[in-house]
Image: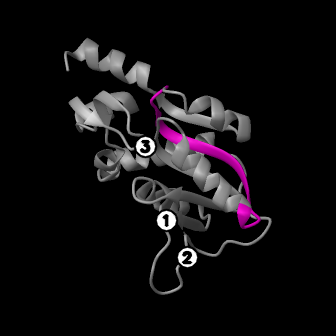
């Protein structure tokens, strides 16, 4: 089960953390730690593949979603896009790496959703380029307000809810 694997590989840590959103938290979910394990990455990819909607391309925001997107692309033979948080100040200056075409239907993958801000920014960027985001799949939903604004825009689903993750951590004495 994914929750057990996230706890076993120490993708969930307890202490004092500041999240990307600026919020303080007593726990941190580091999906990058889990996605560095081939077995866990494969399980996440299987679960994403089961949940997925029909799309032309799969995309994710650097850095946390990159291994997720690559694994999904390889498993499902779907081209991928990588979205930069900031544009490059050299070369082409692109914010989206890959072959994005107007009308492309994009499945957006994310590691952890807290406020949903980075995912909403990615949706805006893709739509500005003429694509449509047909769904967002996240490994973990921290259940801190990101679900509602995402569901107003797209079909949003997560593999794990933070409440279930924390309940299992408490049960195990973490």
Q: Residue furthest right?
A: 103
User: Does dot 1 land on a helix, a strand or a loop?
Assistant: loop
The residue depicted at 78 percent of the width and 69 percent of the height is 102
User: Does dot 2 land on a helix, a strand or a loop?
Assistant: loop
Residue 139 on image: x %, y %: 47, 39
Q: Are marks 1 and 2 in contact (CB under 8 Å)?
A: yes
Report the disc number at residue 84. 1
Q: Quadrant of residue 130?
A: bottom right
Residue 40 on image: x %, y %: 35, 44
The residue depicted at 33 percent of the width and 50 percent of the height is 32
Q: From the viewer's perspective, is residue 132 above or below residue 141?
A: below
Instruction: Decide whether residue 171 is among the magenta residues.
Output: no
Name which of mark 2 and mark 3 comes first in the sequence: 3
Name the residue tied to disc 2: 94
Magenta-tinted stretch:
128-143
Name the residue tied to disc 3: 43
């Amino acid at each position: 089960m994914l929750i057990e694997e996230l706890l076993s590989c120490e993708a969930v840590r307890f202490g004092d953390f500041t999240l990307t959103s600026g919020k303080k938290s007593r726990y941190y979910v580091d999906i990058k730690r889990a996605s560095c394990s081939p077995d866990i990455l494969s399980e996440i990819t299987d679960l994403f593949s089961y949940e997925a909607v029909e799309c032309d391309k799969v995309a994710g925001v650097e850095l946390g979603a990159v291994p997720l997107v690559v694994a999904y692309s390889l498993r499902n033979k779907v081209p991928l896009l990588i979205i930069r948080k900031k544009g490059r100040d050299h070369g082409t200056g692109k914010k989206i790496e890959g072959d994005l075409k107007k009308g492309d239907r994009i499945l957006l993958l994310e590691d952890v959703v807290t406020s949903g801000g980075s995912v909403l920014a990615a949706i805006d960027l893709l739509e500005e380029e003429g694509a449509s985001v047909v769904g967002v799949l996240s490994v973990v939903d921290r259940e801190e307000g990101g679900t509602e604004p995402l569901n107003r825009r797209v079909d949003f689903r997560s593999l794990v809810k933070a409440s279930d993750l924390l309940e299992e951590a408490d049960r195990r004495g973490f």
